[in-house]
Image (cartoon, rainbow, N blue to C red):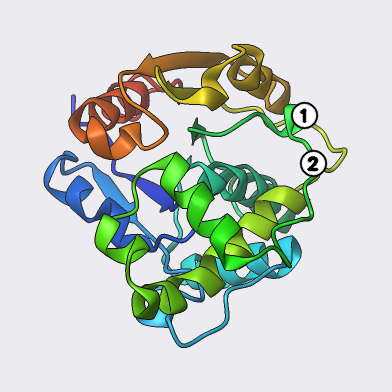
């Protein structure tokens, strides 16, 4: 039996653009079509200011992907991207577009366990740089170059503010399966409730998988992450045949 093509929308972590999923193209099978929308403030949209309002961000993502959407649809997001993915799933369902049949939240504290932190909007640049160092994943040459920092910090600041200001809305949970990924050495994976509480976001099954690595395990173990995504999508019910 041939598996039906499925669209996989991938959302990036804070400060990153669509390019972080470029390597996935060579790892995904022919029946998964990757869509990596570019958010304002990065990549081809570097000249646009990064957004600091959740409603505006989700509307912008929907406007970017809607012309290409068709069922079946799946969503993947890492770190901030996981929050974008869950909000996008609810927004698509509310707009009448067929709701995603699968969502993966990677490297992100569950919505109900997040703490409000409004300090990022006005904190010193040094605080942002220190946080980037602690998370890992940012090349040293970027952290040590004032010119490069001047390019990336406005977007990082806006994204950190989005994450810190995020408050989950009261709404019916999704119906689809939810895969939650965490890094073995990522502090957000402890306590386990930080990840398992994602189960509150859906009436469908929720599975938590830990992968070796820190916060950016999706880069450290890219092939393992993609393999999990492929196997999870291939097992969807009703079957994609």
Q: Nearer the viewer, residue 21 or 67?
A: 21
Q: Quadrant of the N terminus?
A: top left
Say whether residue 115 is left or right of residue 35: right
Label 1 Cα neighbours within 10 Å, binned few <14 / some 14-19 / many ≥20: some
How many labels sit on residues? 2
Query: In the rendered view, would you say 205 is above or below 153?
Result: above
Say whether residue 156 is left or right of residue 166: left
Q: Say if mark 1 contacts mark 2, CB within 8 Å.
A: yes
In percent of width and height, residue 227 lies at 23, 26
Q: Residue at x 36, y 81 (%)?
A: 147
Say whether residue 71 is left or right of residue 90: left
Residue at the spot of label 2: 168
Q: Residue at x 25, y 63 (%)?
A: 141
Residue at the right extreme? Answer: 170
In percent of width and height, residue 125 lies at 57, 66
Query: In the rendered view, would you say 170 is above or below 154?
Result: above
Label 2 Cα neighbours within 10 Å, binned few <14 / some 14-19 / many ≥20: some
Residue at the spot of label 1: 112
Question: SS of the residue at dot 1?
Answer: helix
Q: Nearer the viewer, residue 27 or 80?
A: 80
Question: SS of the residue at dot 2?
Answer: loop
In percent of width and height, residue 188 lies at 56, 26
């Amino acid at each position: 039996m041939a598996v039906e093509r499925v669209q996989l929308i991938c959302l990036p972590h804070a400060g990153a653009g669509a390019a972080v999923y470029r390597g996935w193209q060579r790892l995904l099978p022919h029946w998964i079509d990757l869509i990596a929308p570019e958010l304002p403030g990065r990549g081809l949209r570097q000249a646009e200011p990064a957004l600091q309002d959740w409603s505006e961000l989700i509307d912008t993502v929907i406007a970017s992907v809607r012309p290409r959407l068709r069922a079946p649809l799946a969503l993947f997001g890492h770190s901030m991207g996981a929050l974008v993915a869950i909000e996008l799933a609810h927004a698509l369902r509310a707009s009448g577009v067929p709701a995603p049949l699968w969502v993966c939240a990677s490297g992100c504290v569950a919505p109900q366990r997040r703490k409000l932190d409004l300090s990022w909007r006005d904190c010193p640049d040094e605080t942002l740089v220190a946080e980037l160092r602690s998370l890992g994943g940012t090349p040293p040459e970027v952290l040590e170059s004032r010119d490069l920092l001047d390019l990336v910090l406005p977007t990082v600041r806006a994204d950190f503010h989005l994450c810190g200001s995020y408050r989950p809305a009261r709404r019916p949970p999704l119906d689809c399966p939810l895969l939650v990924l965490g890094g073995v050495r990522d502090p957000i994976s402890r306590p386990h409730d930080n990840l398992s509480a994602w189960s509150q976001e859906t009436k469908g099954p929720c599975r938590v998988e830990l992968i070796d690595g820190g916060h950016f395990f999706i880069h450290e173990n890219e092939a393992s992450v993609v393999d999990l995504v492929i196997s999870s999508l291939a097992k969807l019910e009703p079957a994609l045949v």
